[in-house]
Structures are given as C-alpha cells and as structure tokens.
Image: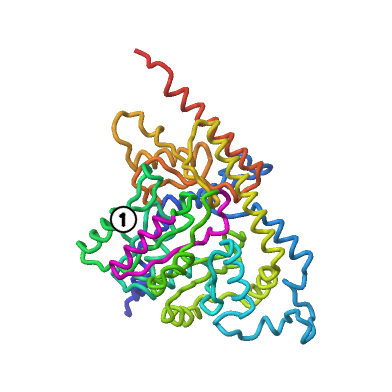
Amino acid sequence: MVGKLLPAASPALSHVATSGSHGEDSPYFAGWRAYDDDPYDAVSNPTGVIQMGLAENQVSFDLLEGFLREHPEAAGWGGAAAGSGVASFRDNALFQDYHGLKTFRKAMASFMEKIRGGKARFDPDRIVLTAGATAANELLTFILANPGDVLLIPTPYYPGFDRDLRWRTGVNIVPVHCHSANGFQVTVAALEAAYEEATAAGMRAAGVLLTNPSNPLGTTMERSVLEDVLDFVVRKNIHLISDEIYSGSVFAAPDLVSLAELVVSRPDVAERVHIVYSLSKDLGLPGFRVGVVYSYNDAVVTTARRMSSFTLVSSQTQKTLAAMLSDDAFALEYIRTNRERLRARHDHMVAGLARAGVPCLGGNAGLFVWMDMRRLLQGRGDEATVADELRLWDLMLHEVKLNISPGSSCHCSEPGWFRVCFANMSLDTLDVALARMGSFMDRWNKATTQPKEH
C-alpha cells in the first residue's frame, strides 16, 4: 500500500517580503483601515469615520478640471494627425526614452522655479522623473546609502518614511529629536546627538533628510537653520536630501527658503545636495504618480536615471502635464489661487479647533495642522506617555469617528500632538469634523471639572 503524500510546506519568501520594516502596523496606517471599513458619507453613512489622516489637496481641483475643459487636446489623442501638435495614440503608446520627455522636464523645471518665486533655477537635464516622491526618496536612498547605513531625520517626520526609506533598501533611520520649545526646529546639538548615536551603534551615517515645508508640522525651516544643517553635513562629509514636496503650498509668511537657493551662494556644498519634489501635493495629483529627483551631483543624476527605469511616468501623463505646466498664465494663477484657498482652509480649521479649546502649532504651509492635545493627557498627575496618547487616538477614531494621526507615529518625543488634515474634504465635511471635535471637548471638559463624589 502506497502511503499518502504529506502536503509540502510552502516555499520560503525573501527576507524583504517577510520583513516587518514596511511599517504598516503603525497607527498611522491603522487609522486608514478604520476609515476604509466605515467611511463617512453625508447621506449614506453620516456617522462614519471622517478621514483626516490623508494629506491630499482637493481645494483647487476645479482649476485643473477647468484647464482640461478649455484644452481638451492636452489629455486626448482621438485620431490626431501626424504633425498636428496633438499627441496621437501611437505617440503615447510606443517606447519612450526613460530619461523622460524633454518637454515635460522643461515644464517641470519652470514650475519648480515659479513656486519658489524665481529665487532658484532648475536645469531640466538634472531632473530625473519617478513614479511619485515615494519612489524618488527610495531611489536616492539606494544611491546614497548601503544596507546597514543610517539616515538622520529630524522629528516629527512623515510616518511613511519608515517604509519608503527602510523596507527594501536595508537602510536604517536614526531620529533627530526636536522639541516644541523652539517650534520643533532642528538644532546642531540634536544632529550631533543622533550622529553619535549612530556611530556608537556601529552604523555609518550616510546623510540627513529634511522635509521643508515640514510634514507633519506645516512649517518652513528658517534660513539660519538650513545653513547650520549644511555646515553639519560638510563637517561630517555626508549627503543632504531636502524633500520639498509641499514647496508650492506655503500660504503665509515666512516664505519658503529652498535648499536650491543656498546652493547658489555655496557652490562648495552642491555635490552633496539632492532635492525631491512631486506634483501629488501642490497640484493635488497623487494618482498621476509624478515625482522628481533633482541633484547637483553628476554621478547621482546618472545613476538615478539608470534606476528610474523601475519607476517610470507614463507618456500620456507627461504630455498632459507638460501642456498644463507650460501655460505660464495658468501655472501662475493656479499657484496664487491655491495658496489663497489653502490659507483660508487652514485658518478655518485653526479657528474651529480654537473654539473647541484645542490649540495648534503656528503653521504657514502644507495641508494639515499640528494639533496640541497634551493637556488631555495630563490629568493623572504624572508624565504623559505614548500609551496615553494612543488611548486618546483610539477614542478619537472609534468614538468621535475622526481619523487623525498620532504624533508617536511621526516619532514625536512629546506625547499629545496629532497631525490633522484639512484639504482632502469639502468644507461641509470639515465643519462636521469640527463639530464632532467641539462636542468631544465639551464632554471632556464637563467630565474633568465636575466635583468628585465623596
């Protein structure tokens, strides 16, 4: 009698596939899943979760739609004749050089200059296109660091960096701890402490990564701080990445100081400076997946271009956006109007939270506020902990039905801060969210001020 074969064990997967460094067990992503399971809708699900954890810009989408209505040729190809100037299906479908279309790289360089008020210049031949800023940051990490090396990143920082920079590259992150006492501005002392921490652990620091304007703070970095960071990376002989994905979303003073401006006056630092940009935030087009690596280092540009074949932008996307961004009048009007609308939405959000008794860090950029709920964690008489913060986050998510991002997911060292987005929803929905926050704070205030029974 022939015995039955036992089922074979499943073949093993790679270390990357089974690694936990994707970071998706963070409360940041858990909040998204809770929203997906119970999404708010004013008609069909008015008690659902309102998504305030997604930094998406929908306040100026009508301007983009208006441009495409007036210029249907920018997005179409229907039967265009050769030489007509309108892209045909054949033009879009056949192989394109992975360097990216020259017309689009020129349009992108021009747009990046416009949003910086002409204070910096960008060479189209140094622009490397990627499928979004996520791909751009990972690509730079592959180029600048080896597995086991570290990047130094000031806190609080975008939670997605834990996935984007670490998962597939094998590179680690050492947080540069910043504090509310100085508005979370990075200091040389904090940079030195993080560098020494990496060295003591036997890890090589490959570079510093900044986000300017900051996600999640919604603030711009001071020129003197940027100068200090530049001096630091020169002393340590390491790289400096500036993620400037929100550079066109600065809506109030002080204006953005781009690292590109400082390179002009400090050509000695140029080869260690690399800038990341994307159209996902300023133009509100995350679905188009358009990112940029801009480096002043020839070897980095060459290598990034080679590696970009793994993360290309479609020809149709490039041609549509080249037409849009090459229209100087439209681009300038979009930048101006978008900033006005973001400022109005930001001020509406801050005022609504203030009425509820909830302060925010003073912000001038981005699609979110950095909300201060530390006083809600301080009722027990001892020092607040991350566990306290996460209990409050869970309450906000499952009872108040607001998905906000806890500061601990951004590696903030002070429990009680939360990132709250305001541009990914209608004003009516935002008002519902603010009303929920107001009701929650009313209940909390009553519960904490009522005399205890003896």
Q: Is residue 7 visible?
A: no
- Rendered residue at 21%/66% (across/down): 202
Residue at 63% across, 40% down: 46
Q: Position of residue 106 (x, y in %)?
A: 61, 75
Please say whether residue 248 is one of the residues in the magenta stretch.
yes
Q: Where 259 sits versus 218, above or below? A: below
Determine the residue positioned at 46% across, 74% down: 295
Amino acid of disc 1: Val
Image spot of residue 440 (x, y percent):
51, 31
Please tell me whether residue 447 is drawn above or below residue 261 in the rendered image: above
> Which quadrant is home to the N terminus?
bottom left
Can residue 421 be seen in the rendering of this structure? Answer: yes
Apparent side of residue 272 relative to residue 39 in the rendered image (left or right)? left
Q: Looking at this view, is 434 or 240 the one in front?
A: 240
In front of the other: 347 or 78: 347
In this view, the residue in front, 110 or 54, is 110
SS at mark 1?
A: helix
Q: Answer left or right for 321 relative to 252.
A: right
Q: Is residue 100 above or below residue 396?
A: below
Q: Which residue is mark 1?
A: 188
Residue 203, horizontal then vertical, whole percent: 24, 67
Q: Quadrant of the C terminus?
A: top left
| Residue at the image position 42 percent from the left and 77 percent from the top | 297
Q: Which x, y percent locates residue 128? A: 52, 76
Q: Residues within 10 Å of mark 1 (few under 14, many from 20)?
A: some
Residue sticking out furthest to the front: 265
Q: How many marks?
A: 1
- Can you tell which quarter of the image residue 99 is in? bottom right
Q: Which residues are magenta?
A: 223-252
